[in-house]
Amino acid sequence: MDRLKNILKKSLILSFVFIFTFFFSTTKNYADDFYRNDIKVVVKKDGSADIESVMDYEQTKGSEYYIPIDNLSKSNIINFTVSEIVDGKEVVYKRLDNWDVKKSLREKENKCGIVKKSDGVELCFGVGEYKRKTFILRYTVTNFIKNLNDSDMLFWKFINDNLQAPPQVVNITISKQNASFDKENSKIWAFGSKGKINFIDGKIVFSSLERIKSNNYVTILSKIDKGYFTGGEKIYKNFDDFKTKAFKGSSYKKNRKKSSYFKVFSSPMFPTLITMVVMAIFSKNMIKKKFKGGYKAGDLKSEYYRTIPTKQWYKLSYVLECAGFSGSEAVIRAYFLNWIQQKLLIPITEEKGKFIFKKEVLSLKINENIDYKFVDETEKILFSMVEVAARDDRILQEDEFKSYLKSERNQREFKRLTNALDDLSVEFVRENNFVEKTDKGKWTYNYNEKGKEFTEKLIKYYNYLKDFTLLSEREIAEIKVWKELLIYASLFEVTKTVEKQLKKLSPEVIEDYDIDVNSLHTAMIYSYVFSSNFINAYESSVERSSGGTGGFSSSSGGFGSFGGGSGGGSR
């Protein structure tokens, strides 16, 4: 009897395992796959556009595929057709005037239609047998081009966000009928996902660089000189009205005025340094939440804190940014100063040019004879960029960052680095319990009392350094942490004030406390020059994209476009 029970027990277990395995083997792949979407757009002189969308797609559920297209304004979708590639030949689907979403899989097979909504349409077609297929959708958009006061405009959302199965690869090609798009007559930008947009052979070409995710989308904006289009939708606005809205929250930037900070470091020996600038690196890929509830630059005036807030200054990138200071660029600047202080980088001058055209240029020599320990992987990655930029001679010159960042791969690495600095900052805040949690234990971006107290120390220490000239010689002589103090002065961009006061010290104080004012001056100049050169070289590469001549897309922004919508897929 016991033996029979054991046999039954084993049989039940094996049955359960079989059912469990079968269930997961059949449901594991129970998801649609959108392998590739190639879209071709031909814009005609009358302002309309013929669009062809080739979908390499496999549907595993539902009876149809649908694409919402909203925000049509005065545009209409006409001449909609769907076909399928079968054995290398194109099989055209039957177009139904009234599409019924409730019909069965078989009833919708080889058919297509349009569902009209109050705010747009849905392009629909039956998928038939569940297997990988190539579909070709074609349709015309009237009034695709918008005729503005100062230019014509193309502003269309081609790939929706919140698709059930986003395409893994997206390529979009936009051409003019019997004419071309180029840098002379057009400006271009792309939003919503990581990709590149460029002028290629008279066409606007967008290519994704990473797999599209559900929260991604692809929107293309183009400013086009007037003169080619004879029709389109007339909108009594200027292009900048749309561009401003599209750029909001994106990594594209408006033109900004340059800082004259380096005038304080002017020197007859280095006249070119006067024009160097410290600028923000770039807006984040995504719209990050700001830390709230803490003190900011300008608060707590005339209140001071005389101790460094934390020795982990390299983790303050996003904390500083939210407090009104520079963010990741401040930390990069401080790293350069620290490397010079620690003699990992040695400031030198080199002669460049020949004969009467010779001039002295700043350089940094990598010290091979020092055992330097990096604080974390992020610092190590940043320094490795310096090493690669310096090339074989291990001497970094001012213009070598520009050459280094010509590579798109290096641009992406630098962008990842600055994002990593901000992520490190968020981790620092959480590790120290500086922000509140929700009832469910999820971190917020709201400072608690402990976090507010930390920002108070940070701002009071900033005030202390900013008002450094008010300190007496005795107070300065009592300072024991000069290297850390200068790091924070660099973070807060008040090194000029600190240096000015140091120059007033008596020779006795300077000798007693081993303060080399000339070395400090050199270290501060070089750290600013080379960190800013690095940042500005990256800035230039991004500005080329921001200027509308092509380059990287922005992973966010692009709001205010026409067409597209949210959602879509199988149903």
Image (cartoon, grey):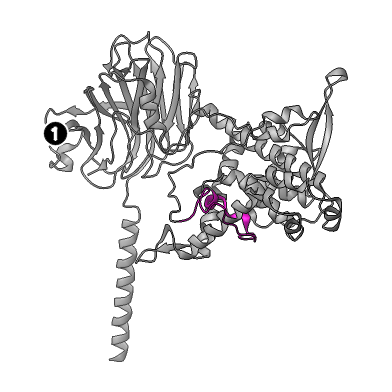
> Would residue 538 be visible to someone looking at this image?
yes
- Residue at (44%, 38%) from the top-left corner? 555
Q: Residues within 10 Å of mark 1 (few under 14, many from 20)?
A: some
Residue 301 sits inside the magenta stretch: yes
SS class of the residue under badge 1?
loop
268 relative position to 220: left or right: right
**Could you say which is closer to the camera, residue 260 or residue 512?**
512
Disc 1: which residue: 99
Instruction: Judge whether 78 appears above or below 280 on screen.
Output: above
Q: Position of residue 374 (x, y in %)?
A: 70, 56
**Could you say which is closer to the camera, residue 220 or residue 492?**
492
The quadrant of the rendering that contains the C terminus is top left
Residue 513 sits inside the magenta stretch: no
Main SS of residues in magenta: loop
Q: Position of residue 311 (x, y in %)?
A: 65, 60
Q: Position of residue 556 (x, y in %)?
A: 41, 38
**Could you say which is closer to the camera, residue 289 or residue 24?**
289
Q: Residue furthest bottom?
A: 1
What amino acid does circle 1 point to?
Trp
The magenta span reads 294-320
Write down the quadrant of residue 69 in the picture: top left
